[in-house]
Image: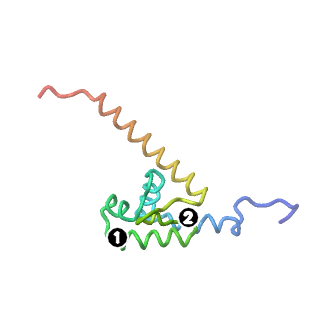
Amino acid sequence: MKNGIDKPCDEEKLEPYASKFKAIGHPIRLKILCLIAHQEVPCVGDLWRCLNQPQPVISQHLAILKKSGIVSSEVNKTKRVYSIVDPFIKSLVDSIVCEVKSEHDSDSEEEKQLPTSPV
């Protein structure tokens, strides 16, 4: 780089982030991450029941997240339990969940304040 100044948006430096965003970009994978982040012991059975998706579909999405280094799994008794191991993605998912919860709480407050019709 000229004058020893690094560009913050250098393609080489952004590539790992682009790969991570690609891996989490599918709505089901993003939902999986939200569930993993906020359940005590998220296993595949819990995930596919919560998402109303067949177990093979959830397993395929988990495999993509695992291959990308975003989640890991360990066997806990008879269950395979997942956790988010990428700190960047964990922080991002926590922010998303916080934002969604804030929007939901705001919507709930607005509904409480709407006047009811006497009819």
* Residue 34 pos. (x, y %): 45, 54
Identify the disc placed on residue 70: 2
Left or right of residue 73: residue 10: right
Within 10 Å of the Cα at label 1, are there few (<14), some (14-19), or many (20+) other Cα atoms?
some
Choose between 77 and 92: the one closer to the eye.
Answer: 77
Could you tell me how far apart the alpha carbons at marks 2 and 1 are, in whole angstroms?
20 Å
Q: Residue at x 51, y 53 (%)?
A: 93
Left or right of residue 109: residue 73: right
As drawn, the residue found furthest toward the left would be 119
Q: Secondary structure at mark 2?
A: loop
Choose between 27 and 54: the one closer to the eye.
Answer: 54
On-image quarter of the N terminus: bottom right
Residue designated by label 1? 55
* Residue 39 pos. (x, y %): 43, 52
Is 94 above or below relative to 28?
above
Q: Secondary structure at mark 1?
A: helix
